[in-house]
């Protein structure tokens, strides 16, 4: 157990080193697109809200020399779920941010939620959401597990580190939203989102509930979309500052 902790610490150290002071590459992933509309209410569609906020975030990050922004899609097109983390990996992204809007049979449900990937959902609601967001996944064939024990342990450790960093990213974003936006921030939750499987700090943000008429109209406004993008941008800045501090302490 002690050795396992040492491994985790070493891996966390390596990922902090990866940050340092160089610009960090953020893969922004606007959820859904094309024939996959996502949540909808009276012509307001999740895919459009997600793209608008993502494009605003892209502009904000692009104007800051600390960041290199990237997008999984920059127009209304369908991208399979599995291709999204693959794009982040091939573009050597340091952070993955998937942007969505929620829906619930309870019309009064409202607020922003931040998710990170864990194969065990934190509650039934998170599991249902993961099932819904995972539904456009094109399944890839999986063969028998031929990994050695050591490979399995290392892969477990990488996964643990990925969860710790992703949870930290969610915490910083949630704190920033609480400070900067007068929207109810609901919770940080964990759920088995396939889109968050890339090996870098990754989060899925459900900006608000399209199923709530007030929130749907609010989310469709361009000044609100700008405000939401600004809050994500501030959160990413704070996350980078925190990692830079740790990097300075461990490297200097
Ligand atoms: Zn979605």
Image (spheres, rainbow, N blue to C red):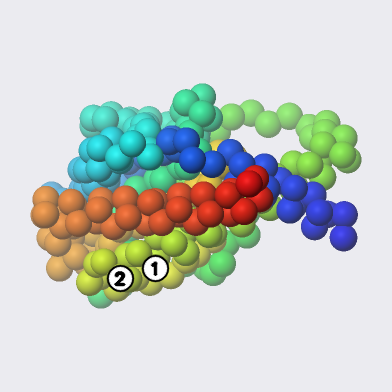
Image location (x, y in percent) of residue 180: 26, 66
Residue positioned most to the top: 90
Image location (x, y in percent) of residue 32: 33, 40
Mark 1–mark 2 distance (CA, rounded to whole Å)? 6 Å
Report the side of 204 relative to 77 (left or right).
right
Pointer 1: what residue? 175
Looking at the picture, does residue 37 appear above or below residue 171?
above
Could one spot residue 27 in this view of the protein? no
State the image quarter where residue 136 is shown.
top left
**At x 32% / y 55%, what residue is drawn?**
234
State the image quarter where residue 106 is shown.
bottom left
Secondary structure beneath label 1: helix
Nearest to the observer: residue 17 or residue 121: 17
Name the image quarter holding the N terminus.
bottom right
Looking at the picture, does residue 138 appear above or below residue 210?
above
Pointer 2: what residue? 179
**At x 45% / y 50%, what residue is drawn?**
240
Looking at the picture, does residue 205 appear above or below residue 182?
above
Secondary structure beneath label 2: helix
Mark count = 2
Report the side of 49 relative to 201 (left or right).
left
Image location (x, y in percent) of residue 202: 50, 47
Nearest to the observer: residue 128 or residue 98: 98
**At x 24% / y 46%, what residue is drawn?**
53
Report the side of 217 relative to 54 (left or right).
left
Q: Is mark 2 within 8 Å of ligand 1?
A: no
Report the side of 101 relative to 134 (left or right).
left
Whether tag 1 and tag 2 are in contact, CB under 8 A, the answer is: yes
Nearest to the observer: residue 5 or residue 204: 5
**At x 87% / y 54%, what residue is drawn?**
3
């Amino acid at each position: 157990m002690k050795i396992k902790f040492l491994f985790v610490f070493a891996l966390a150290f390596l990922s902090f080193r990866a940050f340092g002071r160089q610009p960090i590459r953020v893969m922004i992933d606007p959820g859904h697109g094309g024939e996959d509309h996502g949540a909808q209410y009276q012509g307001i569609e999740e895919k459009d809200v997600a793209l608008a906020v993502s494009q605003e975030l892209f502009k904000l990050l692009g104007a800051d020399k600390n960041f290199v922004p990237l997008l999984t899609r920059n127009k209304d097109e369908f991208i399979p779920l599995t291709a999204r983390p693959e794009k982040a990996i091939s573009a050597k992204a340091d952070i993955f941010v998937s942007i969505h809007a929620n829906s619930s049979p309870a019309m009064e449900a409202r607020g922003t939620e931040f998710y990170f990937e864990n194969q065990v959902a934190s509650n039934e609601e998170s599991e249902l959401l993961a099932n819904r967001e995972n539904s456009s996944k094109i399944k890839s064939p999986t063969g028998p597990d031929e990994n050695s024990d050591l490979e399995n342990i290392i892969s477990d450790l990488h996964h643990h580190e990925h969860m710790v960093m992703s949870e930290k990213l969610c915490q910083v974003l949630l704190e920033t939203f609480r400070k900067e936006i007068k929207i109810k921030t609901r919770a940080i939750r964990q759920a088995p989102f396939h889109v968050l499987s890339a090996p870098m700090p990754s989060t899925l943000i459900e900006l608000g509930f399209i199923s709530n008429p007030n929130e749907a109209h609010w989310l469709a406004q361009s000044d609100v979309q700008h405000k939401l993008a600004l809050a994500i941008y501030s959160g990413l800045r704070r996350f980078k500052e925190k990692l830079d501090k740790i990097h300075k302490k461990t490297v200097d």
